[in-house]
Structures are given as structure tokens and as C-alpha cells.
């Protein structure tokens, strides 16, 4: 989703509240995803999520003038399809990470994705990355090493899963910026949902497992949180400038830690707190530098 446009009414306090609400809903979604993926195949769980996601973006398209034809209109379908495939693969990767590494450590590592965006924006989009942002990127990756503690303990190979998820999400974000040069937000959102649903159905249908009524209820709740979270995010960027509210996206880590500790009895290691703090600080600095560079004059 493009975050470069400035809304006509820049209500920053409302935008901040909507962003915090978004992160809370997405944290609940991750908790539900972990529970369901521990009991059923990850591909099936993500496939059903995407069915509801696709229904949501199609419903949004039908409500607007021009309908689906206008929403799907793009001059760069290959890149849009690649974005959709990449995001669906990233979601599968992160949900898998939740089941093998836990919510807390998965999200602590995944938090480095804005730093990957900054690092890759040069070679992919041709954007200039100054020495200050490179220094922040370096600090952030030191934070990742603090979390993983190589040399002090046996590094769990599962730690590579959220790191791969962060890399995929960073490339997805950069491709979203790329297509935003010619496609609007509604078009990119439509292709994300529909492409993901097609891909996940083609893969996930082979891993179908019968669900208990209780878990179907949780699956329905998961789908509702997905739709609600995306709706809140859209509203957030409609009412406030993205650069003003984006730092508050880090509150998802707080909500995720609360769910991981209270629901799944995960352990919060001091190294995770220190490393995540370094990553978040570095990420906030890169966002601040990016905002400065986008100011006119």
C-alpha cells in the first residue's frame, strides 16, 4: 500500500489512535494464527485468511465508481502479481515462525524490516541512502545479533524464518513504492488480495484438514481481525500523513509481547528486550531521516 500521499485532512492525533488500534488488531491476528497453525497446516490457515481478504478488497472495489474493472486497471500487472505472491509467501513464513520460534522472538527479529527497506531502497528504487541511515541500519542489525546471541548460545536455525519474513516484507514494501508511481492505493490493494487468494488456494487446497467447531470460530475471528486491521490501516492513512503515524506501528511489538507472555507462556529474555530496543530506535531514526529528506526545500 502506498504511503507517500498526504491526506487532505491531516488529523495526526486521530491517525495515531487508528495506527495503535491497527497494531493491536494485527497482534491479536498473529496470536490466533499461531494457535491455529499449531493445530492445522500453515498453508490451509493462510489460504482461508486470504479468502476473506480477497472478499474484502472485491467488496471495496464494488463500492467505488468503475467497480472491479477500474480497481484492477494497471499498466504493470507483472509487478503487481509479484507483490501479491511475495506477501502471501511472507505471511506463510511468519506464521510458521510463530509456531517454531514463538510470537515474541519472531516479532523482535521481524521488527528490522524498515531497516531492510532503507538498505534496499538504493539498489531497487535508486534512492539515496546517506551515511547516517547506513549507521542506523548497522545499529539495527547489531540489535538482531543481540537477540540471536551467536557465539553465546547455539543459534536456533528457526531464527532465520522471521529474518526471511522481514526481508520478503521489505521487498514487498519497496515494490509497493515502485508501483505507486503509476497505480493508486486501491489498485495495489486489490491486486494484493486477489493475487494472494489465487496463489494460496492453488497451494493450500492440497493441505485441507477438517476443523473442530471451536477452531472454526477462531478462524472466523482471525478473518474478521484481518479485515478489520486492513480497514483501520486504510482509515489511518486517509486521515493522517503516513510519516507522522508510521513510528507508532512499532506498538505492535508491545501488544505481541503481551499476548506471547500471557497466552502462550513465552519467555522474554533480556537480550530480546535490548536487541529489539536497538532495532526500534534505529528504525525510528531512519523514518525521521526519510521524513526530513521528503520535506520541500
Image (cartoon, rainbow, N blue to C red):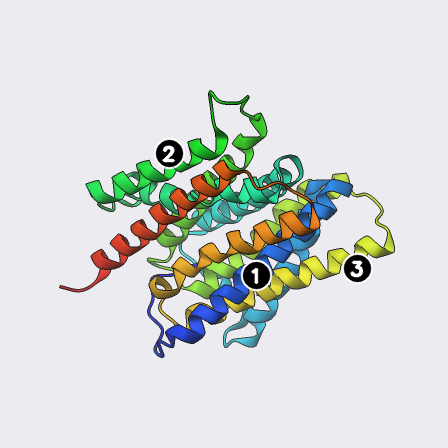
Q: Secondary structure at mark 1?
A: helix
Where, by quadrant of the figure, is residue 227 drawn? bottom right
Q: Are the residues flagged by discs 3 and 2 in contact, CB closer than 8 Å?
A: no
Pinpoint residue 99: horizontal percent, then vertical percent. Answer: 67, 39
Of tags 3 and 2, the one toward the viewer is 2
Of tags 1 and 3, the one toward the viewer is 1
Q: Are the residues flagged by discs 1 and 2 in contact, CB closer than 8 Å?
A: no
> Is the residue marked by circle 2 packed among few (<14), some (14-19), or many (20+) residues within 10 Å?
some
- In this rendering, the answer to whether 201 lies above or below 141 is below
Residue at x-position 57% and y-position 26%: 156
Farthest residue, direction front: 270
Pinpoint residue 149: horizontal percent, then vertical percent. Answer: 47, 28
Mark 1 or 2, nearer chain start: 1
Q: Mark 2 sits on what residue? A: 142
Residue at x-position 59% and y-position 55%: 27
Which one is in front, 137 or 139?
139
Residue at x-position 43% and y-position 47%: 79
Q: Mark 1 sits on what residue? A: 24
In the picture provided, is 213 more to the left or to the right than 296? right
Q: Secondary structure at mark 3?
A: helix
Q: What separation in Å lies between label 3 and label 2 (alpha carbons)?
A: 41 Å
Mark 3 or 2, nearer chain start: 2
Pinpoint residue 122: horizontal percent, then vertical percent. Answer: 27, 41
In the picture provided, is 174 more to the left or to the right than 28? left
Point out which mark residue 249 bears. Answer: none
Say which quadrant the N terminus sits in: bottom left
Say which quadrant the C terminus sits in: bottom left
Residue at x-position 32% and y-position 40%: 137
In the picture provided, is 161 more to the left or to the right than 250? right
Q: Mark 3 sits on what residue? A: 217
Q: What separation in Å lies between label 1 and label 3 (alpha carbons)?
A: 20 Å
Residue 293 visible in image: yes
Amino acid at each position: 500500500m502506498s504511503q507517500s500521499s498526504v491526506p487532505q485532512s491531516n488529523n495526526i492525533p486521530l491517525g495515531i489512535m487508528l495506527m495503535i488500534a491497527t497494531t493491536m488488531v494485527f497482534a491479536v491476528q498473529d496470536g490466533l494464527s499461531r494457535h491455529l497453525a499449531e493445530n492445522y497446516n500453515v498453508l490451509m490457515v493462510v489460504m482461508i485468511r486470504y479468502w476473506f481478504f480477497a472478499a474484502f478488497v472485491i467488496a471495496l472495489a464494488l463500492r467505488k465508481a468503475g467497480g472491479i474493472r477500474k480497481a484492477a486497471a494497471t499498466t504493470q500487472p507483472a509487478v503487481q502479481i509479484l507483490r501479491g505472491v511475495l506477501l502471501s509467501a511472507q505471511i506463510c513464513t511468519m506464521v510458521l515462525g510463530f509456531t517454531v520460534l514463538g510470537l515474541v522472538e519472531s516479532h523482535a527479529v521481524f521488527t528490522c524490516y524498515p531497516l531492510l527497506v532503507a538498505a534496499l531502497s538504493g539498489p531497487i528504487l535508486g534512492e539515496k541512502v546517506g551515511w547516517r541511515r547506513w549507521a542506523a541500519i548497522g545499529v539495527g542489525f547489531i540489535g538482531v545479533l543481540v537477540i540471536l546471541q551467536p557465539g553465546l548460545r547455539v543459534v536456533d536455525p528457526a531464527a532465520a524464518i522471521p529474518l526471511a519474513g522481514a526481508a520478503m516484507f521489505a521487498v514487498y514494501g519497496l515494490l509497493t513504492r515502485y508501483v505507486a508511481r503509476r497505480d493508486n492505493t486501491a489498485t495495489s490493494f486489490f491486486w494484493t488480495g486477489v493475487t494472494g487468494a489465487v496463489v494460496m488456494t492453488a497451494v493450500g487446497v492440497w493441505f485441507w484438514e477438517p476443523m473442530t467447531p471451536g477452531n472454526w470460530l477462531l478462524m472466523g475471528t482471525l478473518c474478521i481481525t484481518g479485515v478489520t486491521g486492513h480497514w483501520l490501516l486504510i482509515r489511518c492513512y486517509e486521515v493522517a500523513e503516513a510519516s507522522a503515524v508510521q513510528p507508532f506501528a512499532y506498538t505492535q511489538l508491545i501488544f505481541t509481547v503481551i499476548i506471547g507472555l500471557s497466552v502462550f507462556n513465552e519467555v522474554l529474555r533480556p537480550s530480546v528486550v535490548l536487541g529489539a530496543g536497538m532495532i526500534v530506535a534505529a528504525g525510528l531514526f531512519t523514518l525521521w531521516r526519510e521524513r526530513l529528506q521528503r520535506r520541500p526545500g
